[in-house]
Amino acid sequence: MQEPDDVDRATDLLARARRVSVLTGAGVSTDSGIPDFRGPQGVWTRNPEAERLSTFQDYRDDPEIRRESWRQRVAHPVWSARPGPAHDALVSLERSGRLRALLTQNIDELHQAAGSAPELVVELHGTMHHTECLSCGARAPMSEALERVSGGEVDPPCPYCGGILKSATISFGEALDADVLRRARDAAMDCDVLLAVGTSLGVHPAAGLVDVAAWAGADVVIVNAEPTPYDDVAAVVLRGGIGELLPAIVGGTPG
Ligand code: NAD
């Protein structure tokens, strides 16, 4: 745990900032019942083989990986998850008028469910709430595909062209959308504080946004239970539970 002084320093930096860009990761949603990948109870920590489900080539080339992905999507905790205190705290920050952008690696849409303005949320890795066809690019609500899986289709093909359907997320081996990445870099360049929360900062190019912000002169504040490769770059690092720390440094219930 960090010193109480560090909480005060982070609170002070955020209170004085005119523009705050926030980078969130899976750790903001663990209190909502969605496991992260690399934390102590993470999906990959418990089962390293599960990484193949998030690797584009494996998904495209291996029908068994796709069948397992659909089985897991149907049962995923995201469908019943509700925003937690960290999501609410970021809505409070937005209502204070100083949120420049909410850059999220999460694919669960819990920031929008909490009330964050969709135009401020930049989904770096896409969303689980839609599907995309790998052949024709058709996009559709995930619920339509999940109904087909529940009805017995183990690997539902695209209803338009018969291609492979996948969640509209960025897997390893896929490039980020260029426009999304540009918006994220602009927000990292244009802030007084970059607040990185609940991310191991191990996935690029998202993690590199911390460097972009620091290079442009922003103070970096990191809130995460475990060390990250960017702790040395940060003005303040807070270690502990996000659900307690984030409301403490940015304000509690959305007003
Ligand atoms: P990660 O799993 O690599 O790291 C999460 C970090 O959060 C860990 O360091 C962990 O110690 C910390 N953490 C977890 N719960 C915490 C808590 N309550 N308080 C304090 N710290 C906590 O996640 P990442 O950095 O976001 O990168 C992994 C990729 O995983 C991203 O691409 C993202 O798309 C994907 N992912 C998303 C979700 C989601 O949408 N909720 C869930 C799992 C994975």
Image (tube, rainbow, N blue to C red):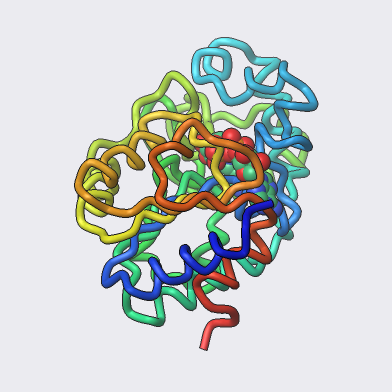
Question: Looking at the picture, how far across and down is residue 138, in whole percent?
Answer: 39, 39
Residue that lies at the very extreme toward the top in this rendered image? 61
Residue at (48%, 23%) from the top-left corner?
A: 172
Relative to 96, residue 112 above or below: above
Relative to 245, residue 255 above or below: below
Relative to 62, residue 8 above or below: below
Question: Looking at the picture, how far across and down is residue 246, in whole percent?
Answer: 57, 65
Which of 178/242 is in front? 242
Q: Is residue 78 visible?
A: no
Instruction: Judge from the rendering whether residue 158 lies leftward or rightward of residue 73; answer left or right.
Output: left
Residue at (58%, 79%) from the top-left corner?
A: 252
Which of 165/195 is in front? 195
Residue at (53%, 32%) from the top-left corner?
A: 166
Instruction: Judge from the rendering whether residue 96 lies leftward or rightward of residue 238; answer left or right.
Output: left
- Quadrant position of residue 62: top right
Q: Determine the quadrant in which ligand 1 lies.
A: top right
- Quadrant position of residue 230: top left
Please give the count of numbered marks on the rendered protein. Answer: 0
Which of 148/214 is in front? 214
- Quadrant position of residue 61: top right
Question: Looking at the picture, how far across and down is residue 203, in whole percent?
Answer: 47, 30
Residue at (33%, 74%) from the top-left corner?
A: 16
Instruction: Judge from the rendering whether residue 82 lies leftward or rightward of residue 106; answer left or right.
Output: right
Q: Is residue 117 visible?
A: yes
Which of 223/168 is in front? 223
Question: Looking at the picture, how far across and down is residue 202, in whole percent?
Answer: 50, 29
